[in-house]
Amino acid sequence: MKTYPNDKLIVVGALKGAHGVRGEVRVKSFTADPEDLFIYGPLTDEAGRLVLTPLSARPGNDHFIVKVREQKQKEEWDALKGTLLHVERAQLPSADEGEFYIEDLVGLEVCSVGDVAEGRIKAVQNFGADDLLEIHLITGGGTVFVPFTQTDVPEIDLNAGRVRIPGLAQWAEVEDDK
């Protein structure tokens, strides 16, 4: 079983501001099952500072209306509008066999042939179409983007800490041509 750094925070939602004047807040969930956002307990900002502790939640239009433990004025909650809400990676349930969390790819080595690392996954980006792996090349060349498809990324080995991208050189050439 793979373990994760305790300080690795994963975005699970966003604060949309106050709901009324009774201390409730509006929260947008980013989890696959939106209600799951509230089973993780306290939600933090990107620095790990507590933002809110959900006590109960009910559905709104495209968000949830959440009763929270923290007592703040409406203006204080509204000032936090847009704050991304995080939980520690270790709090998330294990992925099913053959599945993984996108965030688990960040930091993995990238090999094209053999087991010699040629780069490292810096981030997983989505600029509106499909996911792209942002790869920092180890031997010069800076950063390249590779489509995150079964064809382009046929092997992901989380236990070994690497992915295989046989056509990595072609993507580096595309970036050089720009």
Image (tube, rainbow, N blue to C red):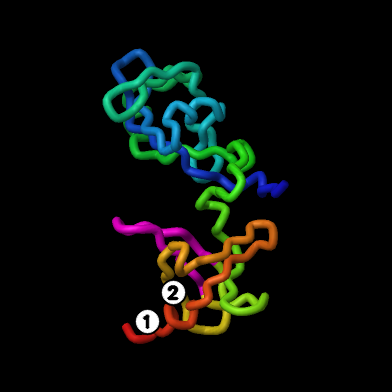
Neighbours of disc 2 within 10 Å: few (<14), some (14-19), many (20+): many
Q: Residue furthest top?
A: 22
Could you tell whether 109 is left or right of 14 in the image? Answer: right
Query: Which quadrant holds the C terminus?
Result: bottom left
Q: Which residue, given by chain and number where applicable, does mark 1 sit on? A: 174
Residue found 45% across the figure and 67% down from its top: 151
Neighbours of disc 1 within 10 Å: few (<14), some (14-19), many (20+): few
Could you tell whether 136 is left or right of 171 in the image? Answer: right
> Which of marks 2 and 1 precedes in the sequence?
2
Residue 127 painted magenta:
yes
Q: Which residue, given by chain and number where applicable, does mark 2 sit on? A: 144
In front of the other: 48 or 58: 58
Provide the residue span drawn in magenta.
Answer: 121-136
Marks 1,2: beta carbons within 8 A:
yes
Q: Position of residue 116 (x, y in %)?
A: 66, 78
Q: Position of residue 5 (x, y in %)?
A: 66, 49
Residue type at the position of mark 2: Val
Q: Position of residue 63 (x, y in %)?
A: 33, 28
Could you tell me if residue 32 is visible in this image? yes
Q: Could you tell me what secondary structure mostly forms the magenta stretch?
A: strand
Dot 1: element: helix
